[in-house]
Image: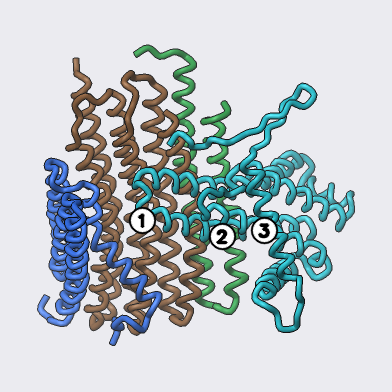
Amino acid sequence: MEDLGKIHQLIVPVFGHEMTFNLEIILMTWIVIIGLLFFGYLATRKKRIIPGPIQVLGEIFVDQFYALAEDALGKETAKRYAPLICALFMFLVLSNWLGVIPHLEEPTKDLNTPLSLGVMGFFIAHYAGIKKKGLKAYMKGYFEPIFFMMPLNLIGELAKVVSISFRLFGNIMGGSIIIMVVSYLVYNLLLPPFLNAFFGLFVGTIQAFVFTMLTLVYISVQVN
Amino acid sequence: MEISGPDLIRAFEMLGAAISMGLGAIGPALGEGYAAGKALEAIGRRPEEAGLLTRTMLVGQAVTESTGIYSLVIALLLLFVV
Amino acid sequence: MMTDLEWIKAAAMMGAGISVGLAAIGAAIGEGYTAGKANEALSYRPHLIGDILKTMLVGQAVAETAGIFGLVISMLLLFSPMEGKPLLTAWAYIGAGFSMGLSSIGCGVGAGIPAATACQGIGRQPSVSGHLSALMLIGSGVAQSTAIYGFLIALLLLFKSLPPEVTLIPACSLVGAGICMGFGGIGPGIGEGIAAGEAVSSVARNPVTMSLMTRTMLVGQAVTESTGIYSLVIALLLVLTI
Amino acid sequence: MTDNPPVEQIRETEKRYGSAALLFAVGMGFLFILLDLKPVGKGLILGCIFSVLNLVIMARTLPFRIGVSRKRATLIAGLSVLIRYALLAIPLLISLKTEEFNLAATIVGLFMIQILILADQLVYLAYPSRQKNYTS
């Protein structure tokens, strides 16, 4: 059980500072990205009126998330942000499912991945707000309802990033720690496949959906 | 048993992390359960709105869970950073 | 002056008492709530006595799981060999008692609520009693997962090999792991029970929504579970980093 | 209770889960014994016997708890809980004190009834038509 939380790191000195790379996580992220690109290539290679199975899968994703984005953002804005939402969900789902395959790990198990996605969502939401309402109206939003609520509003905005990324990280890391400890305790008998199915497939899908929906909601709060 | 100052501080950090996460888990979970229950009741009344209600339930639960996540952050900070 | 062995024995007895006592409280609240609602349903539908009693029996049998968990841990605490163990074991035993006992409260209450609403629902819609008891058992089964986490932490605390010398930090970590998992198990258990109860009563009102309700219930419970998972993670970190 | 039908139905539930649990435990137990894991098989059977006993006592005391005064119901429920927990402690004690019964298997055996109830309902959810309908 000593390998709990052990990470293979590559430390590169740059101008007197040290840059740390988590090699496994980067590798796993690239696996996910290549898998998604391959899926996209297969789905759009031969576009037909009567679609093949992979094209159907792609159309389901795009359809569903376009409808969701339209619900939350309105027709015009949805066109701009629906691809982002759809891609985010597909990336997260594939990342969370990756841990089911032996010897592979979920990239979301490392805090850096969810945190960077959360920060990305944060900046996109505020960019959308500024673009839609204009800088002045956007800034005015922070001084609601009275002037000195500004610090509290700022903290509230930052807390959104913390909560959205720690939720994903906590669930995925918790699942993988539980699977590891239980497999160690029962000598890999019988239980771990069920735990893998529950934490990897079920919880992974739900948390990916929650993360995507929250990003969408944050954008829609800024836009409307 | 001799107790030095840093030891005492570290020990209480452990205890503090435990209490923070343990008690912090009660409230959000109860609230989320209540939200899920009410959403299920509403779906029972109007099954045709199930998609919208499920989405609203998830967003509501996600916001409710924030305090639980803050407890987790504090506990992790106490364990690893401070 | 007490010897190490006596201290460990005293701690084991205290842990065993906490474990089985709190677990029995949880199981009793759940079973009592079920019995009360079953009586209420019987009072206005006396001719359904067979169905209602059957559901009540099955529901109580599942709610009893909490009590059995507590009993198992307390017997392990009382009768496992203690000679030659380090003094830190005493702290681990108290932690194990807290972990199992407190998380069993959530488990018992959480399993009792859906059983009670199932008894009520059968009074309302006797034609779907099979559906109702299936949904009830799935819901209360999921509500018991935090008690299983508590059981896991208690077993880890019982069987972990500890360093021989006593210092304050591992002692606090051991008790803390128990408290963290114990309190963390209460909320998710009861919350998941509430969700399952509402699902059962909705199906009793509108039986066609069964599959939709099962799906939505599982999704809601999975999100409710996450604080329990956080508690488990913190408890595991506390135990394993000693 | 004087009227027969409820008692009949409770007996039916009891028989169904009890016999299934015993059958399953004995089958698995013999499998383990054949595989030369004697303590595991014996522990499983021991735990399961007491688990079934627990269910039987619970079912038999159920009719006495319905429709009586509050005080009496509380007394009966409390007594039955005490007796049942004392009963469940016996196999644990036996398997802790002797090497012949595996402890983990005994614990699994104690939960046999609950595991079977859950599995039964999962099967009902998956194939509703396969099972005898409760209502009929």
Residue receiving disc 1: A190
- Amino acid at dot 1: Leu
Identify by letter the chain in cyan: A
Q: For the residues carrying marks 3 and 2, which lies nearer the camera in this image?
A: 3
Q: Earlier in the sequence, mark 3 or mark 2?
A: 3
Work out whether C137 lies above or below A153: below
Q: How many marks?
A: 3
**Badge 3 element:** helix
Q: Colour of chain D?
A: blue
Question: Is C221 displayed left or right of D17 in the figure?
Answer: right
- Whether residue A185 is visible to the viewer of this picture, yes or no, is yes
Identify by letter the chain in green: B
Pointer 1 and pointer 2 on the same chain = yes
Return the chain for callout 2: A
- In terms of depth relative to the viewer, which is nearer, C143 or C164? C164
Circles 3 and 2, Cβ within 8 Å, touching? The answer is: no
Residue receiving disc 2: A206
Determine which quarter of the picture holds residue B47.
bottom right
